[in-house]
Image (cartoon, rainbow, N blue to C red):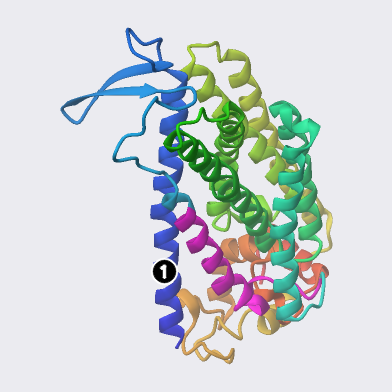
């Protein structure tokens, strides 16, 4: 059964990546296209663009509302978004809800049942969409800048709140799920329905309501600025240096702000506008992120240097309790016939050989032990970190 689950996870992750590339790629292309349209030489279009690719020439035309008559064949860009969300939410359920005890719950923060923890995660996703949608429909929604600032603050708050309940890696993923759900919600509830209303009006011989296209464009622009933060969150589980910080929500906010600034640089470049000021802001945000994380590590190393000497005898019981049940030549953890990745902590030499990895997953972050089922305390993590910082003496 574990092999079936692993293959299913691989398939969903691959599908999520493929459809995500298709969705975000088309989104980037149309934003670029919209920013590069020129007044048409003739005809009723509001803008046009000639381009060359793959040995052929393309002539794109845009209509501010809609053409006078509908073409026989009209392509709708929607399934890329829908399947990205379907595969993503399925992957979330498979890994973090079915495997809640391992990947979602941290009993040191909140001793939740898998059902309760999963319900909180789903409720957070639903609440995120409701908050955002109501914000956009309010008077504030007419200002993209105001919506962006308030929404960014809301997601920073969500990251902080979820990190108090879930393990930090799961908190990051849920913020990504909220943002991704808002993006696909924009497509499903606003952009596509508004386009259908415009088509229906044309077929009925009526003039489409211009506000429909304007609302869809606003939501599309919001999606454009959310893409880089959500892409970072998709890969964040591979980088404990981010969610393993003392204030993971702050690191996520800084990296997300960096991504938004980078996206703005591209949007400015598409319109042949100056980017120096925005590039400077993006650089400062990126530098602030790295400096903040580095300062935390320096503080940890200083504390370790000032701490009393720690020997292997002091940390060996910690490793035996929290690590060796899986990472041993004869694992006792249910479901493990052999040590994961062949990493074993049978003796001092093997532990020292993997001291750097232990620091990454058990000291700098709470990845291990999985789901913290053995309830490893912060004091134990600090002691283990002090021992490693002192050169892992025997």
The quadrant the N terminus occupies is: bottom left
Q: Is residue 317 above or below residue 119?
A: below
Q: Residue 191, located in which quarter of the rendered image?
A: top right
Image point (48%, 63%), residue name: 87
* Residue 45 locus on image (x, y percent): 39, 18
Nearer to the camera, 89 or 362: 89
For this view, does 39 lie left or right of residue 221? left
Image point (75%, 68%), residue name: 120
Nearer to the camera, 33 or 394: 33
For this view, does 159 lie left or right of residue 218? right
Furthest residue in direction top, as rendered: 41
Q: Is residue 379 above or below residue 30?
A: below
* Residue 144 is inside the magenta segment: no
- Span highlighted in magenta in the image: 82-108
Image point (69%, 56%), residue name: 244
Q: Secondary structure at mark 1?
A: helix
Image point (19%, 31%), residue name: 54
Which residue is identified by label 1?
A: 10
For this view, does 317 lie left or right of residue 189? right
Q: Residue 227, located in which quarter of the rendered image?
A: top right
How many numbered marks, from 0 up? 1
Q: Residue 9, located in which quarter of the rendered image?
A: bottom left
* Residue 264 locus on image (x, y percent): 57, 25
* Residue 5 locus on image (x, y percent): 46, 80
Answer yes or no: is residue 369 visible.
no
* Residue 137 locus on image (x, y percent): 74, 39
């Amino acid at each position: 059964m574990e092999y079936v689950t692993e293959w299913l996870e691989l398939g969903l992750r691959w599908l999520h990546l493929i459809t995500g590339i298709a969705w975000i790629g088309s989104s980037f292309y149309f934003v670029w296209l919209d920013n590069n349209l020129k007044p048409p030489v003739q005809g009723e279009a509001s803008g046009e663009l000639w381009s060359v690719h793959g040995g052929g020439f393309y002539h794109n035309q845009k209509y501010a509302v809609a053409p006078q008559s509908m073409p026989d064949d009209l392509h709708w860009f929607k399934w890329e978004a829908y399947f990205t969300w379907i595969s993503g939410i399925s992957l979330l359920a498979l890994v973090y809800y079915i495997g809640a005890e391992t990947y979602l719950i941290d009993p040191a923060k909140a001793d939740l049942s898998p059902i309760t923890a999963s319900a909180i995660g789903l409720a957070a996703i639903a609440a995120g969409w409701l908050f955002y949608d109501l914000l956009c429909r309010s008077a504030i929604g007419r200002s993209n800048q105001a919506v962006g600032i308030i929404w960014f603050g809301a997601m920073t708050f969500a990251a902080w709140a979820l990190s108090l309940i879930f393990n930090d890696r799961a908190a990051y993923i849920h913020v990504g799920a909220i943002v991704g759900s808002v993006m696909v919600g924009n497509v499903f509830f606003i952009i596509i329905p508004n386009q259908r209303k415009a088509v229906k009006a044309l077929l009925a011989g009526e003039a489409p309501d211009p506000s429909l296209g304007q609302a869809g464009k606003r939501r599309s622009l919001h999606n454009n600025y959310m893409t880089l933060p959500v892409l970072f969150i998709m890969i964040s589980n591979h980088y404990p240096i981010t969610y393993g910080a003392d204030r993971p929500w702050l690191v996520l906010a800084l990296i997300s702000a960096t991504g938004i600034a980078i996206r703005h640089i591209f949007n400015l470049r598409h319109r042949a506008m100056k980017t120096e000021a925005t590039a400077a802001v993006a650089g400062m945000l990126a530098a602030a992120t790295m400096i903040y994380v580095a300062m935390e590590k320096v503080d940890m190393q200083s504390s370790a240097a000032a701490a009393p000497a720690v020997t292997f005898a002091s940390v060996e019981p910690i490793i035996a309790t929290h690590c060796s049940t899986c990472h041993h030549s004869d694992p006792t953890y249910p479901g493990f016939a052999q040590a994961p990745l062949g990493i074993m902590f049978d003796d001092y030499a093997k532990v020292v050989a993997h001291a750097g990895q232990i620091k990454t997953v058990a000291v700098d972050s709470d990845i291990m032990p999985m789901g913290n089922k053995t309830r490893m305390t912060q004091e134990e993590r600090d002691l283990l970190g002090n021992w490693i910082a002192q050169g892992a003496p025997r």
